[in-house]
Image (cartoon, rainbow, N blue to C red):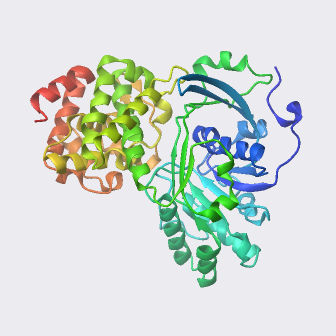
């Protein structure tokens, strides 16, 4: 079988590069690139994508396949089975700033460029004061964007029509606002001038977003069955559920730029994202993030396997319905109905969503997705939520990096893994709990100040080590009742 690429498929026509996309992972390829593909076919967007890798590494396989890959969409919609696949061809070019920064900056000179999309995880939108203007390649994603925008500003001599429509997809509150604020910080740090700052704010638009789609990615365990449906060998197959939500803060001007309304997809241009975001991030993403270390330590491999198991499934459901939903000041009926739909999605029989594939940056994810529920529950009921507290202990234990002689799938920033490794050198588990919880870099606050949390985390760590996950949790709840 020949490899999937443009020569073998005959797809040699090039689209004008209109979109610069930071991130090449499963989610963007199964979500944003799918939408772009649909817009090209059904709304004549005529947009090619240039993919920029935000971290170290390479894009060798994507380049070998000339940006082509197949997306399999499988699930249940309105009681009907959906099982379809399509070729995604909108990616036209790949650039790795770490290995060729000049090639990256040259993207700023592309006349047709209009949009910027990103998904660099919650840890991506961050300011690093050590990212000096003359230090290439820049380490942080916002610094890279600042450098590109400044290059574009100078190359086109401040042309008002050369600004970009910036649509980040990172799961943090006010994601576009945060990105813009950090870019302005770099503008001041690098002394780029008031003219650039004015162009940045008046000729570019920043749109907060909320994204929702489960994209497990490459179906390794069933790849032969997938490959049999294709004419060419595809090493970048992406699988995704049918459900999709893209809520974007914007107005008619955004709709004129991108005709989302011409698609029959759940894409909503709204004035306020907060109700959408709070419900989705706390419940769906919060369940995922709570699940990963807890369920991996238990011995599960997938999301569906976690929910199907009596113990782990009950644990996650109680964490959601009793504690996460209980912490939110939104109508209970609305929250429970949303949670019902989430758990239906979790047990989609077509998707094998590996826990290891969603373990990336688990600490920063916990900070954004789960910690607010834990803190607000404690404030609301004057007691700690037992499942979320035990889940936090599992997270800390997960970052020890091994469990019963087997390496765990840690995937995080080097400095976080290094710091957790240092913390786990402590002789006593009480000290491990203390150091982990008081680390401001992890949580943005000192968690030892939360009444009883350090004591309960230390106890949970001890029970996990001596009793395992299931028996450890049972003893944890017995010794520290929730009422």
Instruction: Identify the residue shown where x is 88% and y is 44%.
Output: 13
Taking the image as shown, residue 381 lies to the left or right of residue 36, namely left
Taking the image as shown, residue 212 lies to the left or right of residue 155, namely left
Residue 52 seen in this snapshot: no
Looking at the figure, which quarter contains the N terminus? Answer: top right
Instruction: Identify the residue shown where x is 30% and y is 48%.
Output: 330
Instruction: Identify the residue shown where x is 52% and y is 75%.
Output: 189
Q: Position of residue 365 (x, y in %)?
A: 40, 45
Looking at the figure, which quarter contains the C terminus? Answer: top left
Q: Position of residue 432 (x, y in %)?
A: 24, 42
Taking the image as shown, residue 197 lies to the left or right of residue 431, namely right
Q: Position of residue 152 (x, y in %)?
A: 71, 70
**Which of the two residues, 356 or 57, is positioned nearer the viewer here?**
356
Vertical placement of 152 versus 440: above or below?
below
Instruction: Identify the residue shown where x is 19% and y is 27%.
Output: 463
Q: Position of residue 416 (x, y in %)?
A: 40, 47
């Amino acid at each position: 079988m020949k490899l999937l690429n443009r020569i073998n498929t005959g797809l040699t026509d090039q689209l004008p590069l209109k979109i610069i996309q930071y991130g090449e992972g499963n989610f963007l390829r199964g979500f944003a690139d799918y939408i772009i593909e649909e817009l090209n076919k059904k709304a004549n967007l005529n947009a090619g994508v240039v993919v920029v890798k935000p971290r170290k590494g390479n894009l060798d396989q994507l380049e070998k396949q000339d940006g082509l890959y197949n997306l399999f969409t499988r699930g249940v919609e309105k009681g009907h089975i959906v099982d379809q696949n399509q070729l995604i061809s909108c990616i036209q070019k790949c650039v790795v700033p770490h290995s060729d920064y000049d090639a990256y900056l040259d993207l700023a000179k592309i006349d047709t460029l209009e949009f910027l999309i990103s998904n660099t995880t919650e840890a991506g939108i961050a300011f690093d004061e050590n990212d000096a203007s003359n230090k290439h390649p820049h380490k942080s994603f916002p610094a890279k964007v600042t450098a590109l925008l400044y290059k574009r500003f100078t190359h086109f001599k401040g042309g008002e029509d050369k600004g970009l429509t910036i649509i980040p997809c990172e799961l943090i509150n006010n994601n576009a606002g945060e990105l813009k604020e950090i870019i302005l910080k770099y503008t001041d740090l690098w002394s780029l001038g008031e003219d650039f700052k004015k162009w940045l704010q008046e000729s570019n638009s920043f749109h907060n977003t909320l994204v929702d789609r489960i994209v497990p990615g490459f179906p390794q365990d069933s790849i032969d069955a997938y490959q049999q449906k294709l004419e060419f060998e595809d090493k970048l197959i992406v699988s995704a559920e049918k459900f999709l939500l893209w809520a974007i803060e914007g107005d008619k001007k955004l709709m004129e730029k991108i005709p989302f309304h011409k698609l029959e997809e759940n894409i909503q241009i709204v004035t306020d994202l907060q109700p959408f975001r709070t419900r989705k991030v706390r419940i769906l993403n919060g369940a995922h993030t709570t699940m990963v270390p807890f369920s991996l330590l238990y011995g599960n491999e997938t999301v569906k396997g976690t929910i199907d198991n009596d113990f782990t499934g009950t644990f996650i459901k109680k964490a959601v319905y009793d504690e996460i939903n209980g912490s939110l000041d939104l109508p209970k009926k609305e929250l429970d109905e949303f949670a019902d739909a989430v758990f239906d999605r979790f047990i989609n029989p077509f998707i094998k969503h590996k826990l290891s594939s969603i373990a990336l940056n688990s600490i920063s994810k916990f900070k954004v997705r789960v910690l607010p529920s834990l803190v607000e529950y404690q404030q609301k009921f004057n007691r700690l939520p037992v499942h979320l507290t035990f889940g936090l202990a599992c997270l800390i234990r997960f970052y020890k990096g091994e469990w019963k002689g087997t390496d765990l799938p840690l995937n995080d920033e080097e400095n976080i893994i290094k710091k957790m490794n240092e913390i786990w050198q402590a002789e006593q588990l009480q000290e491990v709990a203390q150091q982990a919880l008081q680390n401001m870099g992890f949580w943005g606050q000192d968690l030892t100040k939360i009444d009883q949390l350090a004591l309960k985390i230390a106890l949970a760590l001890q029970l996990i080590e001596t009793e395992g996950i299931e028996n450890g949790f049972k003893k944890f709840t017995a010794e520290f009742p929730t009422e």
